Image (tube, rainbow, N blue to C red):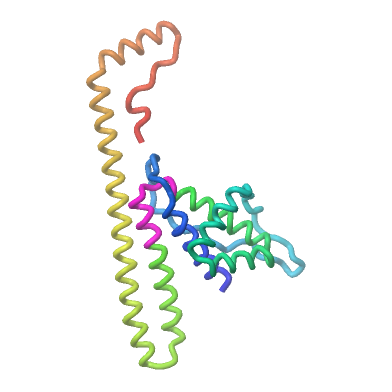
Amino acid sequence: MMRRWMLMVMVAMVTAAATGLPAADEAPASRPERAPRMDGPQDGPRGERHGPPPRALTEAQEAELLDAIRQRRPEYHERLMQLKEEQPWRYRRAMGFLWDWHERLKRMDPEERESVLAEHEARIEVARLARALRDAPDDARRAELREQLRTAIVAQFAAEQKRYEARLKALEEQVKQLREGLEAREQRKDELIEERFTRVLDNKRPPLDPLDDAP
């Protein structure tokens, strides 16, 4: 139960945060982003803390995350505050994971970021309906949940497709920039060679080529 609602908190937070994020200039990550695991260290019988120490956020970073949750999903903010009071170690560890994922989202292209968030929301809905189906009290309720589950899986698949499309679009843009850089380098070939020749003679570092700053 603890892990499930912590994952819900994570998705709620990044959904809220993404709405206010500026368009990223950096290239998106090379692999689809997945939500971090919210396992956290387990407390032993005497309160021992297992696992690596949680990442310490600054007061400003913690306030930014908590404010995003409070504005969009106050019920999750309340649960997170309860975790902070009852299990500070787990709270700090969860916040560290949340901030790291939040930072990775900022590096994504906006379209890819939205598709990643939609996919996580869909995955949670599929899991929720699957649990409800296992606990259904009668055939009528099971039939109803089966239809809802199928609809949710269709939505999940569609979100995955959008993420792949967004990633492909980003890769195509990178290829375009690389090609433009290659063409610019070829056009300046003689100039670049002469500059490098002169600098080597003067025992200086060669200047940057146009492709050196390519994504």
Q: What secondary structure prevails in the magenta region?
A: helix
Reply yes or no: does residue 109 show up in magenta: yes
Q: Nearer the viewer, residue 182 or 66?
A: 66
Q: Is residue 136 left or right of residue 6?
A: left
Q: Quadrant of residue 148?
A: bottom left
Q: Quadrant of residue 172?
A: top left
Residue in the image at 58% along x and 59% along y: 94
Residue 104: give x, y in percent of width and height: 46, 49
Q: Nearer the viewer, residue 136 or 112?
A: 112
Q: Is residue 101 above or below residue 211?
A: below
Residue in the image at 25% along x and 31% along y: 180
| Quadrant of the frame with the N terminus | bottom right
Q: Is residue 45 left or right of residue 101?
A: right
Residue in the image at 38% along x and 45% along y: 23
Q: Residue furthest front?
A: 71
| Quadrant of the frame with the C terminus | top left
Reply yes or no: does residue 154 show up in magenta: no
Residue 152: give x, y in percent of width and height: 34, 73
Residue 112: give x, y in percent of width and height: 35, 52
Number of disc labels: 0
Residue in the image at 74% along x and 65% along y: 47
Q: Is residue 204 above or below residue 150?
A: above
Q: Is residue 87 above or below residue 103?
A: below
Residue 95: give x, y in percent of width and height: 58, 56
Boundaries of the magenta span: 106-118
Q: Residue furthest right?
A: 46
